[in-house]
Every structure is written in C-alpha cells, then in structure tokens.
Image (cartoon, grey):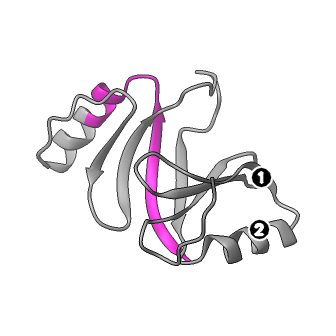
C-alpha cells in the first residue's frame, strides 16, 4: 500500500482547481464540477466536490492509498475494527474504491485500479 492521492474537498471545484493549476503552473482547462486532477501520477493532487459534507466540516482533504489487492486490504481494515463508510465498490471509471474513517473522523480512500488483481466487487 502506498500514498496514491491527496484530494482537496470543496464546494467549487473549478475555482479551487484553477487556483492550484496557477499556483503550480500546470496546464488544464477541465470544467468538471465534480472532480479534477491537478497533478497526474502518484501521488496525485486532485480537487473533488465535497458533496454532503457540511461546509463547516473541518475536513478539507482526503488521503487515497492505492492497493494491489482490495480483498486483502478490506480484510485488513475490518480486522482493525475500522469504521467503513463504503465497502469496496466499482466506480463507473473502473477503479474499485473503499471509504473508511480514521480515528479523527477523516475519510480515507483505498483504491484498486482496473487491471490490478481483479475481483468482482459490485
């Protein structure tokens, strides 16, 4: 398992993504209002719409760890007694994501890219 992504949460993805693109002097003009990658590769820097997370919530960043075997990672998380917010679920873009909560209540994503050890989480 390794750090794969730092994701900043916001209510205005194009605004925050534009700020970081200018700050880091990287190209990109994606107007996607849900999610945008700022720095490709790993660790990736991205900006995502915070969705149901209240605007007053203290959390504004998400860690994403890339795993090769989601089934084994899920078993490990469950053995720790960690609170799971979303069990492993295949996303429309092919990645399998699992969302857990750290002891301070921060969301942590585990992700397995398509093509890694394939299982069939729905």
Contact check, label 2 and label 1, Cβ < 8 Å: yes
User: Which residue is more in the foreground, 12 or 122?
Assistant: 122
Q: What residue is drawn where x is 42% and y is 72%? A: 115
Quadrant of res 94: bottom left
- Locate residue 50 relative to residue 57 in the image: left or right: left
- Locate residue 84 relative to residue 26 in the image: left or right: right
Q: Marks 2 and 1, Cα distance to the nearest angstrom?
A: 8 Å
Q: What residue is drawn where x is 35% and y is 59%? A: 44
Quadrant of res 47: top left
- Residue 68 vs 35, above or below: the answer is below
Q: Which residue is mark 2?
A: 77
User: Which residue is more in the foreground, 113 or 5?
Assistant: 113
- Locate residue 37 relative to residue 12 in the image: left or right: left
Q: Secondary structure at mark 1?
A: strand
Which of the numbered marks, if any, corresponds to residue 84?
1
x, y percent for residue 85: 74, 46
- Residue 38 vs 12, above or below: the answer is below
User: Which residue is more in the foreground, 104 or 45?
Assistant: 45
Is the residue marked by circle 2 packed among few (<14), some (14-19), or many (20+) residues within 10 Å? some
User: The magenta stretch spans which residues?
Assistant: 1-17
Is the residue marked by circle 1 packed among few (<14), some (14-19), or many (20+) residues within 10 Å? some
- Residue 52 vs 102, above or below: the answer is above
């Amino acid at each position: 398992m390794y750090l794969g992504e730092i994701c900043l949460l916001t209510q205005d993805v194009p605004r925050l993504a534009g700020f970081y693109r200018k700050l880091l002097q990287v190209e990109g003009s994606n107007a996607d209002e849900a999610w945008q990658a700022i720095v490709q590769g790993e660790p990736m820097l991205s900006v995502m719409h915070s969705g149901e997370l209240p605007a007053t919530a203290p959390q504004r960043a998400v860690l994403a760890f890339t795993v090769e075997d989601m089934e084994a990672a899920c078993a490990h998380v469950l053995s720790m007694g960690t609170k799971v917010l979303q069990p492993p679920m295949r996303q429309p873009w092919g990645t399998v994501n699992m969302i857990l909560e750290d002891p301070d209540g921060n969301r942590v994503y585990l992700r397995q890219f398509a093509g890694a050890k394939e299982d069939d989480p729905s």
